[in-house]
Image (cartoon, rainbow, N blue to C red):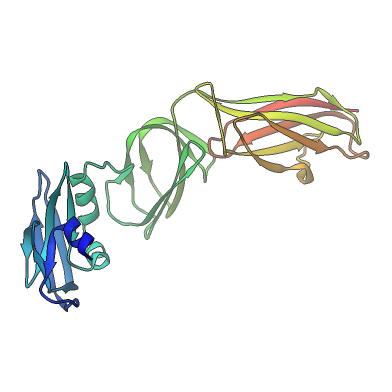
Amino acid sequence: QTGVKKLFGFKTSSPMPECHKDQVDFTVKPGNRDIKLAGEAVPADISIRAATAKAMAKSLTPVFLLNKLGKGSTILLNRNLYQMLAAPDSTLLSDLLAFAGIRPTVKPQKHDWKSITRLRQADAVILGMQRERGDQTDEITLDRKYSVYDLKNCRSLGITDRIKITGGKQFLFSLLPTAKRAIKLKTAETVKAGDNLRLTAQIESGGKPISHSLLRIELFDRDKNLVEHYTTFVFSGKESQDIRIPVALNDKKGKWQLKITELCSGLFVKEDIDVN
């Protein structure tokens, strides 16, 4: 407790928290950016008092405590954060990020998005977005230019820092570095039925190998039909992946085609294979 009080610059008037609910409707300006605090019947601890911190908004007890600490600052929001974030038209999170100098990767023009989720896969940022209505247009501003791939519709949107959203409720994009990307594939030109087709595959971006990117491997027979039981998935590595595909004795003889696709970019390579 002592460390927490020193970190955030506050003291308490009683040894136990004293809960109270009130309405919050303040705008504070700790730097060159306004931070809006709003919410109905938001719980607070009324035993908290400012010590070294500066109380920048106060109802029965400080709402926003700013404490200078070294070269930076700490902020204590003495209210239920979830309720303030859930308030209608809340800009609290974006205001706090802007005050901290953090620029969000994704910035929609409109605020009707139910969820925006980011996760990292290899060197890609996978961006999932969901909204309540599907009849509105929006434009998503990114923090920089990416090579953008629409994962749901399997199409490249090119190198851009903006994504235009039209109809639909759910969207899934892959944000990739703009460096030149390639799949390095080595394989035998022929394979005997009953033997293993051996190949190596590796993803490179800007000439450097990329690990943990998911590859789909497919084989098409001489009639250009996908032979589904040969489809497999592997992750790329720093070293070329050594892959073996057993070819059945009763497979059709002739010219087959091997296809390897990187799922996060849609990038693919094809190679003809003689099955004899």
Q: Looking at the picture, does residue 276 appear above or below residue 98?
A: above
In the displayed structure image, the side of residue 212 where residue 179 appears, left or right: left
Name which residue lies at 70% across and 37% down: 217
Would you identify the image quadrant in which residue 37 lies? bottom left
Q: Measured from the top left, where is residue 162 in percent x and y?
A: 34, 36
Q: Pick whichever, 9 or 268, lies toward us.
A: 9
In the foreground, 265 or 30: 30
The image shows residue 23, relative to residue 4, as above or below, that is below
Q: Is residue 240 left or right of residue 229?
A: left
**Residue visible at 27% across and 66% down?**
82
Q: Is residue 199 visible?
A: yes
Quadrant of residue 22 in the image? bottom left
Measuring from the top left, give residue 131's x and y in whole percent. Answer: 38, 57
Which of these two is toward me, 140 or 225? 140
Task: Assign the C terminus to one quadrant of the image.
Answer: top right
255 and 245: which is toward the camera: 245
